[in-house]
Amino acid sequence: MVKDIDETRQVIYIDRHFIHEVTSPQAFSGLRDRNIPIHRTSQTTATADHNVPTLNQHLPIKEPLSRSQVEALTSNCAEFGVELYQLGHELQGIVHVIGPELGITKPGMTIVCGDSHTSTHGAFGNIAFGIGTSQVEQVFATQCLILDKPKTMRINVNGQLQKGVTAKDVILYIIAQLTAAGGTGHFVEYAGSTFEAMSMEERMTVCNMSIEMGARGGMIAPDQTTIDYIKGRKFAPTGAKLKEAIAYWSTLKTDDDAVFDQEYSYDAADISPMLTYGTNPGMGIKIDQSIPLSDSYEDPKQLVKSLDYMGFAQGESLINKRIGHVFIGSCTNARIEDLRQVADFVTGKQKADHVQVWIVPGSKLVSKQAIEEGLDKIFAQAGFQLREPGCSACLGMNEDKVPAGEYCVSTSNRNFEGRQGPGARTILASPLTAAAAAIEGKIVDVRKYLN
Ligand code: SF4
């Protein structure tokens, strides 16, 4: 913290500023117009992710808008001296995947990016949140930001998850309980034995979707799992610096007597594989539940509108619903553990003929590792297409779109109208549930394969 402005606002120092091609161009223009440099280029990291194609990345980008966005990022970074992991670079990938995997994201940092899912980095015990374009410019110019103090929320989940229930199901369950606006104005801490038992990649999946319940961000206290994940990564500290860092990271825990503005507790045993049926991530049900009826829904008009868009009916079960597309990717679920889990499940199985399945790694390093481990061969045998890294069909901003009216079971984080392309119908789910849907060509409860 740099200083208190008043009781509700503070100026905070930003330890790491991640940028990409979508929210940075106006901020660079602002600096240029005022003839000011970036204050700390060494604390700024850029990558191209939203607009990149995920096939033939060695060729020029076909879509004119995407091409110009990526080219603008390249020239802006060169002009202002920012390190860029551009298309073709061995470290390129989705901004929230590369930060942690390179060891740039470490506990106790303030991290911002012009992207809502910056909350991902909270998995390391960070204050990490998305900012708007004008704030990107402020951080460029000053490495500081004025921040309204958020309210605090703790979400406790304790116990062991059932077989077939993943971190993605945990966060979809929480959002379904609290609604898409349930965390508004709050910063969330996830606590309890269920999160403690998760790997760092699972914790990132959880924190990633904090924004989907309206929260500013989400965090999990660092522990030995965090330390083990960071050690040995490209930009991680080593030797005496690592020792010193670990001593500091180990202090980053909530006080035993801390009081939160809101606190919720859930039992891991109550969580099932989850699906969304509507057009916001709060519209979620357990896979064996039915879509709610409008007379029991708090906003009946929204329910009717969403179901109309999705082509679903009140009271309907989604089990056996035929789907045409499966997207396994995004900053929520495109890390190596996600790909391994899918490969493990689909080994020896074949996708349904009518389904198009895209596996889009979160980064070049994830892609390389998947190939080194032979996952590419398993995907090929199953009929799944392993593409090149990028945001891809998480959002309809590049060449990867789901056609209008088609259902896509997606491991991404948003199911808004048109998110995966105009008229596309998104059903959010875990990688396991998505893989099972790909095999059967319809929605199935993945637990039937696992018990
Ligand atoms: S994968 Fe999706 S949510 Fe994540 S940064 Fe890219 S567009 Fe945003």
Image (tube, helix red, strand yellow):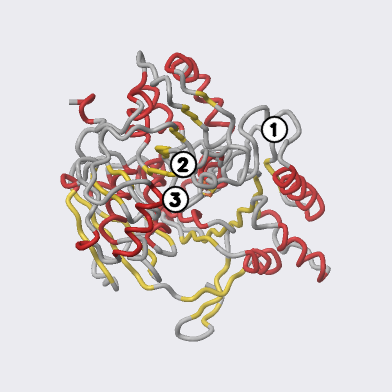
The residue type indicated by label 1 comes to Gly
Indicate the quadrant where residue 80 lies.
bottom right
**In the foreground, 77 or 304:** 304
Depicted 214 relative to depicted 103: above or below: below
Horizontally, is 54 left or right of 286 in the view?
Answer: right
The residue type indicated by label 2 comes to Gly
Residue displayed at 77% across by 45% down: 71
User: Contact (CB < 8 A) between labels 1 and 3?
Assistant: no
Mark 2 packing: few (<14 Cα in 10 Å), some, or many (20+)? some
Query: Mark on residue 239?
Result: none
**Which residue is label 3 attached to?**
414
**Which residue is label 1 attached to?**
88
Mark 1 packing: few (<14 Cα in 10 Å), some, or many (20+)? some
Question: How many numbered discs sit on the rendered protein?
Answer: 3
**In the foreground, 7 or 88:** 88
Q: Position of residue 102 (x, y in %)?
A: 56, 40
The residue type indicated by label 3 comes to Arg
**Which residue is label 2 attached to?**
405
Q: Position of residue 370 (x, y in %)?
A: 50, 24
Between discs 1 and 2, the one toward the N terminus:
1
**SS label for mark 3:** loop
**SS label for mark 1:** loop
User: Contact (CB < 8 A) between labels 2 and 3?
Assistant: no
Some atom of ligand 1 lies within 8 Å of the CB belonging to the residue at label 3: yes
